[in-house]
Image (cartoon, grey):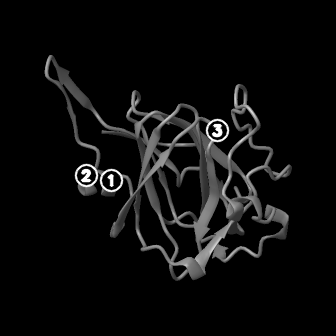
Amino acid sequence: MQIVSLDIPEVKLITPKRFGDARGFFMETFSAPKLAEHGIQRDWVQDNHSLSARPGVLRGLHFQAPPHAQAKLVRVTKGRVWDVAVDVRVGSPTYGKWVCAELSADNDQQMFIPEGFAHGFITLEPDTEFLYKVSSVYAPQADGGIKWDDPDLNLPWPLDGIEGGPQLSDKDAKLPKLADLDSPFKYNGGVQ
C-alpha cells in the first residue's frame, strides 16, 4: 500500500497493491496498522455506498460539524470520479485551498480526508459507485458545506461533455460560499 501526502499534507492519496492472475485480482483496501504508520488513526464507524446513474452527478462540498466531525476514506468500485477536498479550518495556512485526484475502479486509488475539510466529487462515467468509510455516524443536525461553484475557490470541475451542467441535490444547490461560512473548525497545527 502506497500512501502519499497531497499538496495539503493532511490529505493523503492511497494506492493499494493489486495482485492479479487469470482468475481476477485481490487487493487489501484497508489496513489500520498501515494507515497508522502514516498518522491516520481513526475509529471507522460507518461505511456508506452511493450509486450515481449518470456522468455529471455532483455531490458536495460537504462536512459534518463537531462534535460529529467526520474523517473520510473514499474510493470508487465502479466508474470514475474527480474527487476534491477543501480546507475549511480557520487559521490554517491552507484555508480555502483545495486538492483533488481522479479516483477510479481502474486506478484503485483512495483519498483520506481528515476532519476540517469539505469534500465533494463529480462522476465522470455512468453507474459510478463510490464508497465512504467515515469516523462518525451521520448526524443531520451537524450537516454543513460550501457551494460547489464558489468563484473564490475556482475549482476546475471537469464539466466538458456534461450536458446541461452538473446534477445537484436541492440541498447542495443552496450551500453558502466559503466567504459566508462560519466554519466550526479550528486549525490545530496539522495534527491528524
Residue 102 sits above or below residue 191 on the image = above
- Answer left or right for 185 relative to 25: right
Residue at the spot x=72%, y=69% of the render? 91
Q: Inspect the image, locate mark 3, and give the three-letter code of the amino acid beneath it.
A: Gly
Q: Are marks 1 and 2 in contact (CB under 8 Å)?
A: yes
Residue located beneath label 3 in the image: 56
Task: Answer with mark 3 or mark 2, whichever residue precedes in sequence.
Answer: 2
Position above or below: 138 against 125: below
Q: Mark 1 points at which residue?
A: 35
Give the number of the mark in front: 1 or 3.
3
> In the rendered image, which residue does mark 2 sit on?
31
Residue at 68% across, 46% down: 167
Q: Which amino acid does label 1 sit on?
A: Leu
Q: What element carries label 3?
A: loop
**Compared with residue 77, is residue 38 higher up or lower down, i.e. above or below?**
below
Percent from the top left, x then y, of residue 8? 60, 49
